[in-house]
Image (spheres, rainbow, N blue to C red):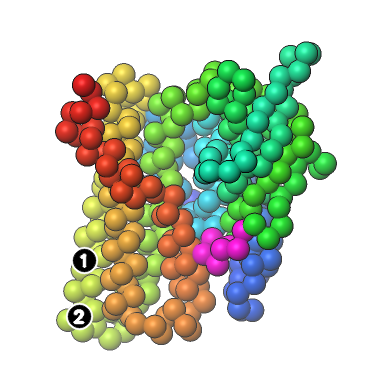
């Protein structure tokens, strides 16, 4: 199935559009994105917006839906992707059901620093305490899946975001790009938690790799949004240089779309990763899509100059958002891992 054959999901609109008309304001962007996020989750609950589980036979549709939301708004896509990723994780690891009205995030980044610790009480119940960084949707999610260090190792926990037990750290998200994604640090205070899966179950499951490709689908949607300015410029006043830039971008975006479709088909054919190819697939897809995004940013900027960045708020946001979002890719570290796998050294 080609990407053009997949129905584009209808993303609920916010009134007014996030950040439109009044210039850049991080708080307004956050509030507008939160409104759209709540509407999108309501549409998912009502069956109006669909993200089939990875490996369910509808992975092509899942990636296409993520890409379409991201092409509309990358900040919204960051929150929607987290919610549908949480749904997939809970289904794969046998966690609690995602009940209607709940908005989930997946907060699993573990950069250097304090981190989150989990303690199991004498009654067998878990609680988490400490600092978790990069918590997208910190003010709009009702629940989160968080990784934390327990006595027996790293575990995943489902945590209701109850007032008094978690606190977004104001001022810890200063980004201009992805400002609306609301991704500050969050401090937990003995928050009630439910263990999901076994030790290291979050990263060891096949779905961890499938989910990483879902993020790449969002990156691609963002690149398509950035490319709109180049396409419009070529349409208005085509020149050999502008057309050449657009041709290069078109090839890249088309190739990335086909690669995502091929990855989706492979995931559906082997959802449990019996062939052991999931990590290799994820590294290849994410590496290629990140490179396509980087080249698209370069081509569009070189072809259109400073004008759209200075006078088109929507385009300026798209560029800033994509620039930040693709830094989830671990660059040369991921490329080095891929090279080691391809060389066969990882198998020795």
Q: Residue furthest front?
A: 113
Is residue 7 at least partly visible in the picture? Answer: no
Packing grade of label 1 (10 A; few <14, some 14-19, many >=20) is few
Residue in the picture at 19% in, 74% down = 244
Magenta segment, prevailing SS (helix, strand or loop): loop
Local SS, label 1: helix
Q: Which residue is mark 2?
A: 241
Quarter of the figure that contains the N terminus: top left
Q: Is residue 177 magenta?
A: yes
Residue 66, disc: none
Q: Nearer the viewer, residue 225 or 320?
A: 320
Part of the protein shown in magenta: 173-179
User: Residue 88 placed where, x, y %?
Assistant: 51, 31
Mark 1 → mark 2, Cα distance in angstroms: 11 Å
Residue in the picture at 37% in, 25% down = 271
Q: Do tag 1 and tag 2 residues touch (Cβ < 8 Å)?
A: no
Residue in the picture at 68% in, 66% down = 27
Residue in the picture at 70% in, 23% down = 119
User: Residue 80 placed where, x, y %?
Assistant: 55, 47
Q: Nearer the viewer, residue 38 or 323?
A: 323
Quarter of the figure that contains the C terminus: top left
Q: Is residue 209 magenta?
A: no
Residue 248, disc: 1
User: Residue 16 placed where, x, y %?
Assistant: 65, 70
Is residue 22 at least partly visible in the picture? Answer: yes
Local SS, label 2: helix
Packing grade of label 2 (10 A; few <14, some 14-19, many >=20) is few
Q: Earlier in the sequence, mark 1 or mark 2?
A: 2
């Amino acid at each position: 199935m080609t990407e053009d054959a997949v129905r584009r999901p209808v993303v609920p609109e916010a009134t007014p559009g996030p950040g439109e008309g009044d210039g850049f304001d991080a708080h307004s962007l956050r509030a507008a994105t939160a409104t759209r996020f709540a509407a999108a989750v309501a549409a998912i609950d009502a069956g109006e917006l669909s993200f089939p589980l990875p490996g369910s036979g509808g992975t092509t549709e899942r990636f296409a839906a993520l890409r379409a939301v991201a092409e509309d708004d990358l900040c919204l896509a960051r929150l929607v992707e987290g919610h549908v990723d949480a749904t997939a994780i809970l289904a794969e690891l046998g966690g609690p059901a995602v009940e209607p009205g709940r908005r989930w995030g997946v907060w699993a980044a573990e950069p250097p620093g304090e981190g989150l610790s989990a303690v199991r009480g004498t009654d067998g119940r878990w609680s988490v305490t400490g600092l978790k960084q990069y918590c997208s949707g910190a003010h709009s999610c009702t629940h989160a899946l968080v990784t934390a260090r327990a006595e027996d190792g790293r575990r995943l926990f489902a945590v209701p975001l109850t007032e008094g037990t978690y606190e977004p750290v104001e001022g810890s998200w200063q980004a201009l790009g992805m400002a609306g994604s609301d991704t500050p640090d969050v401090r937990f205070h003995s928050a009630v938690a439910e263990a999901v899966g076994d030790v290291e179950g979050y990263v060891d499951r096949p779905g961890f790799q499938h989910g990483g490709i879902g993020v790449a689908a969002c990156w691609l949607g963002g690149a398509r949004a950035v490319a709109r300015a180049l396409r419009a410029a070529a349409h208005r006043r085509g020149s050999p240089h502008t057309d050449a830039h657009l041709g290069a971008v078109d090839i890249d975006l088309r190739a990335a779309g086909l690669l995502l479709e091929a990855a989706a088909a492979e995931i559906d054919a082997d959802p449990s990763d019996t062939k052991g190819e999931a990590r290799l697939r994820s590294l290849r897809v994410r590496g290629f899509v990140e490179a396509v995004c980087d080249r698209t940013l370069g081509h569009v900027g070189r072809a259109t100059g400073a004008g759209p960045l200075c006078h088109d708020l929507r385009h300026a946001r798209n560029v800033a958002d994509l620039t930040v979002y693709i830094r989830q890719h671990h660059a040369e570290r991921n490329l080095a891992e891929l090279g080691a796998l391809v060389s066969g050294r990882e198998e020795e």
